[in-house]
Image: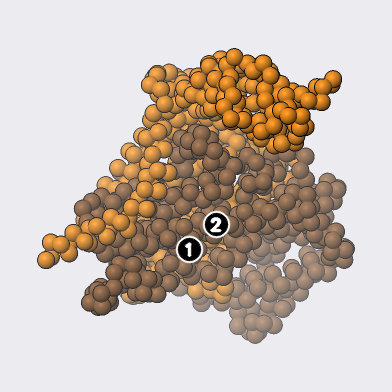
């Protein structure tokens, strides 16, 4: 057995264990349990001990029995150090230990003698580390958003770390923030406006983009190359440099505080990417189909409606979803163009809410949940389409 | 024959393209040129409101006489700074009435009073009166008078359309705006944000490219920060990082990692004692960069993952036969395969981060050392209300952007040649 591999294996696996246990402790703290210490030294020692025993025992026991023994042992020691913990906390620790011992089961004395065994150990544990860390770091803010919206101001002041949700209370109390934002702050109206603007943007963009993309993909005309490059360049131009001129012109034309004005701007800013994505797909449709259609004396309108559209449903759906997402999430233009609370979109409304320092933060979070859920839902449900849209659109945002 | 066909083809193409091109031109290209125009002018936010002549109509009965009715028009110039020329006024009166002692600026033509008020200075105000007397003894309907709105019109200079130009804005941008500070902050933010998102993108892609339970689920989750609305995410982070009631600080205090709460978004510098040297870390800027990385590494992840999945498996198998370790495989197989994607990603993300506005605006509003060029556009234009200055900063952004794009397309072209 190589000493280097052995030391690396023991250290890295026990650090991983410490890491898992600490995350569990953080999550438990957020449920209102009083925990003041990660007990780094004790848990590291326990982890090293378990890793070593695992090597020594090897295959003498079945791996399930082995991991049960480890888990029970660890849970007891941990329970002895931190007394008076609720049962579910110990159950969690037990689960973590089962998971951990199953993971380290495959390392035995033989395994650590192979070439590059130390590198492999590091890589494998880094992968596990990465999976846990990435999930935690990404999901944590979303989790906070959700649980904060169910708390009350008073409860958060008493213990800012207690995010446990009391499901026993009245449903009206539980969803109080949501009732408030819909009743007092008219969020129902904002949802309608946001949906109207986003769906409207999708429809208008498609109506403009499909013919244009067809022309770029299929027809020969003077300035075609120039146009294709300028689509890409225009797409790279950021909203912030358009804001001042558009603001002045829209003010003078009376298009501010007007959902129509917002629709025009959103359509224009999403058109380049929509054309770019669609023309790429249109080029992949076999030309013979259209040639047959020309024989049948169909004009371009007929070709687009009867041949191109039915064949490009997947591409059109990804463009539609992608544009919807951009329009729904858009913030800068709605900040610039909307001052009147009657015309706010959801994003603008939340920003407006936060502008008032008195607004309790659970209302802000309830609003954030309301604006986030539709997008995440659409994303998870139509992931395939959206991912291809994201990769093709590639540069937005 | 083929000539006419290609002509038809051309015409069709132009017809199909026209609506899209027109819209994009008017909303995207026109403003970019308009920026150049405005940046050479001294224009404030208040100047862009076109002055209007306004009249508020008040109808009053006269005490002693039921036959007469007095109308008072409170006339004013809506602008505090600009004059209005040739103000014209018209209002309808009921058929059964006629004006008494009509002002000499006005005349009556078949129930309509036309007035010519001439020029109104800025802030001009006047109470203008008309007394109506009934004809043939019928009572005048007060409600009818109230329901008719007077029409006013006038000409005024539009400050945006005249040809007074000045270089003042650019002088201010470069010499009075802490321009150097602005530029370095922007570059810090852009550079570290880009590098960070690419590094984490590579790590995440490397993870998801392996087989494990819940891999597709993991792939969805990794994209959440990128698809979520920026407003919601920024405010969640703000709550998370709040020095007093924020979860992160309370957790760190609770587990005794720190002794004092850290104001992660409101503190410009954090002094760290490092082996006797005092290092100054730009705290708020670092926090904003971390948010940036958190939000945009999914894009890098998506691209790199797509590339990784296209790497032929045989390469790794051959490496196994040759007895290469994991690290060697990563360095000599994976990295060369993804360098092309990384270089393109770097340019794209660099350009986009350079222009990022919302994230910083929502998190810090540009305070505590996080003022970047895009934030400065907003501040100049709408906080300080100097539209001309805002435009001038925009122009600086556009120029820098054109340089980056030139490099980017050069790179893209070279890549295309290589393939």
- Which residue occupies the foreground of this view, A237 or A65? A237
Give whichever of discs 2 and 1 has the lower sequence position: 2
Q: Which image quadrant: the C terminus of chain B?
A: bottom left
Name the secondary structure under disc 1: helix
The residue that appears at 66% across and 63% down in the rendered structure is A20
Question: Which sits in the foreground, A283 or A87?
Answer: A283
Relative image position of residue A233 (x, y in whole percent): 34, 47
Q: Which chain is orange?
A: B
Q: Is residue B321 left or right of residue B220?
A: left
Q: Residue at x 57, y 16 (%)?
A: B105
* Secondary structure type for disc 2: helix
Q: Residue furthest front?
A: B136
Query: Percent position (x, y) of residue B388?
Result: 47, 26
Picture quarter containing residue B133?
top right
Residue A241 visible in image: yes
Which residue position holds label 1?
A320
Question: The chain shown in brown is which?
Answer: A
Between A151 and B100, the residue placed more toward the observer is: B100
Q: How is the image coloured?
A: by chain
Q: Residues within 10 Å of mark 1 (few under 14, many from 20)?
A: many
Image point (77%, 32%), residue name? B139
User: What residue did someone put label 2 on?
Assistant: A198
Q: How many marks?
A: 2
The chain letter under disc 1 is A
């Amino acid at each position: 057995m190589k000493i280097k591999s052995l030391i690396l294996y023991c250290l890295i696996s026990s650090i991983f264990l410490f890491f898992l246990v600490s995350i569990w402790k953080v999550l438990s703290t957020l449920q209102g349990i009083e925990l003041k210490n990660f007990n780094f030294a004790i848990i590291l020692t326990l982890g090293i001990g378990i890793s070593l025993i695992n090597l020594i025992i090897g295959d003498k026991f079945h791996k399930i029995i082995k991991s049960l023994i480890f888990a029970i042992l660890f849970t007891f020691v941990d329970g002895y150090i931190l007394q008076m913990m609720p049962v579910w906390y110990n159950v969690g620790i037990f689960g973590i230990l089962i998971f951990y011992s199953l993971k380290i089961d495959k390392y035995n004395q033989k395994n650590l003698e192979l070439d590059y065994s130390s590198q492999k150990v590091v890589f494998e544990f880094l992968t596990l580390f990465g999976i846990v860390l990435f999930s935690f770091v990404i999901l944590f803010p979303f989790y906070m958003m959700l649980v904060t919206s169910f708390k009350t101001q008073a409860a958060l002041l008493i213990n800012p770390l207690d995010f446990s949700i009391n499901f026993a209370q009245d449903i009206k109390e539980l969803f109080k923030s949501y009732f408030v934002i819909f009743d007092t702050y008219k969020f129902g109206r904002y949802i309608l406006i946001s949906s109207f603007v986003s769906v409207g943007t999708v429809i208008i963009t498609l109506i403009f983009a499909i013919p244009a993309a067809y022309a770029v993909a299929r027809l020969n005309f003077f300035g075609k190359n120039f146009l294709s490059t300028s689509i890409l360049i225009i797409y790279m131009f950021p909203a912030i440099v358009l804001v001042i001129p558009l603001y002045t012109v829209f003010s003078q034309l009376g298009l501010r505080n007007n959902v129509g004005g917002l629709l025009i701007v959103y359509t224009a800013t999403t058109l380049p990417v929509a054309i770019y994505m669609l023309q790429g797909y249109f080029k992949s449709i076999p030309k013979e189909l259209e040639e047959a259609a020309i024989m049948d004396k169909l004009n371009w309108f007929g070709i687009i409606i009867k041949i191109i559209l039915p064949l490009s449903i997947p591409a059109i759906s990804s463009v539609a979803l992608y544009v919807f997402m951009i329009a729904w999430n858009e913030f800068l233009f709605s900040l610039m163009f909307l001052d009147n609370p009657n015309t706010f979109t959801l994003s603008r409304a939340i920003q407006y809410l936060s502008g008032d320092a008195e607004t309790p933060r659970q209302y802000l979070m309830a609003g954030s949940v309301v604006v986030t859920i539709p997008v995440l839902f659409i994303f998870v449900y139509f992931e395939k389409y959206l991912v291809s849209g994201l990769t093709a659109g590639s540069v937005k945002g | 024959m083929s000539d006419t066909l290609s002509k038809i083809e051309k015409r069709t193409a132009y017809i199909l393209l026209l609506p899209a091109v027109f819209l994009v031109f008017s909303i995207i290209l026109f403003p970019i040129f308009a920026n150049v125009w405005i940046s050479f002018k001294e224009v404030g936010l208040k100047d862009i409101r076109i002055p209007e002549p306004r009249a508020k109509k008040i109808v009053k009965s006269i005490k002693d006489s039921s036959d007469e009715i007095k109308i008072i028009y409170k006339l004013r110039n809506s602008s505090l700074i600009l004059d209005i020329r040739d103000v014209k006024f018209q209002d309808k009166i009921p058929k059964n009435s006629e004006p008494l002692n009509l002002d000499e600026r006005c005349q009556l033509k078949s129930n309509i009073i036309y007035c010519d008020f001439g020029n109104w200075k800025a802030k001009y105000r006047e109470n203008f009166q008309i007394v109506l007397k009934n004809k043939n003894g019928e009572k005048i309907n007060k409600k009818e008078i109230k329901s008719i709105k007077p029409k006013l019109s006038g000409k005024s200079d539009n400050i945006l359309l005249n040809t007074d130009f000045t270089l003042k804005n650019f002088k201010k941008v470069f010499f009075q705006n802490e321009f150097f500070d602005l530029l370095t902050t922007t570059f810090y933010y852009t550079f570290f944000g880009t590098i960070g998102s690419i590094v984490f993108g590579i790590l995440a892609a490397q993870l998801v490219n392996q087989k494990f339970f819940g891999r597709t689920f993991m792939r969805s989750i990794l994209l959440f920060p990128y698809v979520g609305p920026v407003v919601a995410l920024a405010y969640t982070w703000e709550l998370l990082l709040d020095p007093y009631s924020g979860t992160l600080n309370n957790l760190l205090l609770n587990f005794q990692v720190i002794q004092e709460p850290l104001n992660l978004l409101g503190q410009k510098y954090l002094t760290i004692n490092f082996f006797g040297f005092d290092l100054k870390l730009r705290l708020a800027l670092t926090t904003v960069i971390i948010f940036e990385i958190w939000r945009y590494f999914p894009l890098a992840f998506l691209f790199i993952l797509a590339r990784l999945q296209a790497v032929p498996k045989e390469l790794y198998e051959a490496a196994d036969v040759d007895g290469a370790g994991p690290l060697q495989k990563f360095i000599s197989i994976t990295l060369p395969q993804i360098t092309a994607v990384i270089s393109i990603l770097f340019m794209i993300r660099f350009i986009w981060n350079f222009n990022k506005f919302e994230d910083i605006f929502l998190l810090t509003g540009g305070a505590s050392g996080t003022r970047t060029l895009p934030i400065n556009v907003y501040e100049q234009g709408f906080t300080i209300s100097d539209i001309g200055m805002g435009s001038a900063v925009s122009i600086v952004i556009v120029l820098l952007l054109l340089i980056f794009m030139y490099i980017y397309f050069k790179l893209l072209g070279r890549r295309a040649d290589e393939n």
